[in-house]
């Protein structure tokens, strides 16, 4: 699918995918609202609270705000939140499993480098980067857990699940595009789409 174009067209209650011979309609769920918002702004980070706000369209006279970066919004207090208590960003078991998988991936990487298997190395390096980024997001360098403020974890979990469902729907009807988006769209806490070989139009 190198250099191919996949187009998503948003209508009242559905999203239409056109990718070569594949044309499919999806019900426009919360996950689709989040996904389209991210795909429309490649390379720009969105946080869970910001994406949840995307469920409610911005009135026309305020839509210029949608082009602000996350830092500009925070500077203007446009997404001010009132927090009460701290909640860990991940459970200990998940951290243990991700760390274990990262160690496995590092061992695979070393073996592939010894064997000069460049083709397989690219996929392994991508997984290594994703695992490392996740751990950096949920833990400090000294091993202490990072914390959400009150309600933060619930928002992140809700957005993550909704995005996962939307990506799975794509993979069910268009496996190559679905696999591509799973690799290119980061869907935990900081949500961002990093473009690759496939041109995605919304």
Image (cartoon, rainbow, N blue to C red):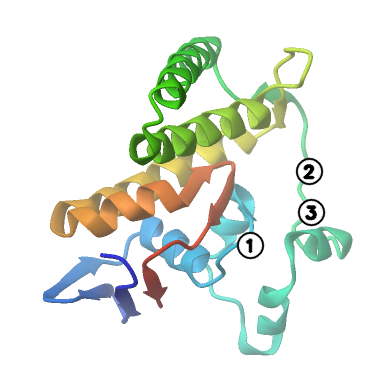
Mark found first going from the N terminus, 3 or 1? 1
Name which quarter of the figure residue 124 lies in. top left
CA–CA distance in space, label 3 to label 1: 20 Å
Residue 137 in picture, x, y percent from top left: 66, 32
Identify the residue shown where x is 47% and y is 11%.
100
Question: Which one is in front, 66 or 131?
Answer: 131
Which residue is identified by label 1? 44
Q: Is residue 171 left or right of residue 76?
A: left
Identify the residue shown where x is 53% and y is 15%.
99
State if disc 3 and disc 2 touch (CB < 8 Å). Answer: yes
Name which quarter of the figure residue 150 lies in. top right
Which residue is identified by label 3? 80
Q: Residue furthest left?
A: 21
> Mark 1, residues whose alpha carbon is within 10 Å: few (<14), some, or many (≥20)?
some
Mark in the foreground, 2 or 1 = 1
Give the vertical position of 181 relative to 152 (above or below): below
Determine the secondary structure under disc 1: loop
Identify the residue shown where x is 50% and y is 13%.
103
Mark in the foreground, 3 or 1 = 1
Give the vertical position of 137 relative to 69 (above or below): above
Mark number displayed over residue 146: none
Determine the secondary structure under disc 3: loop
Residue 142 in picture, x, y percent from top left: 79, 13
Name which quarter of the figure residue 189 lies in. top right
Which residue is identified by label 2? 82
Residue 147 in picture, x, y percent from top left: 71, 25
> Mark 2, residues whose alpha carbon is within 10 Å: few (<14), some, or many (≥20)?
few
CA–CA distance in space, label 2 to label 3: 7 Å
Q: Is residue 98 left or right of residue 22?
A: right
Determine the secondary structure under disc 2: loop
Residue 30 in picture, x, y percent from top left: 39, 58
């Amino acid at each position: 699918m190198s250099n191919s174009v996949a187009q998503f067209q948003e209508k009242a209650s559905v999203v239409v995918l056109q990718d070569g011979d594949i044309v499919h309609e999806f019900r426009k769920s919360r996950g689709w609202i989040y996904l389209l918002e991210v795909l429309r702004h490649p390379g720009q980070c969105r946080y869970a609270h910001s994406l949840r706000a995307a469920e409610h369209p911005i009135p026309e006279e305020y839509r210029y705000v949608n082009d602000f970066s996350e830092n500009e919004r925070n500077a203007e207090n446009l997404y001010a939140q009132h927090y009460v208590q701290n909640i860990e960003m991940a459970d200990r078991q998940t951290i243990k499993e991700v760390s274990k998988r990262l160690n496995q991936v590092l061992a695979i990487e070393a073996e592939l480098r010894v064997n000069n298997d460049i083709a397989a190395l690219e996929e392994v390096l991508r997984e290594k980067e994703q695992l490392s980024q996740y751990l950096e997001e949920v833990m400090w360098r000294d091993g202490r857990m990072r914390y959400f403020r009150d309600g933060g974890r619930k928002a992140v979990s809700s957005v993550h699940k909704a995005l996962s469902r939307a990506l799975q729907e794509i993979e069910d009807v268009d496996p190559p595009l679905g696999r591509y988006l799973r690799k290119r769209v980061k869907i935990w806490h900081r949500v961002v789409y990093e473009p690759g070989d496939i041109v995605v139009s919304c």
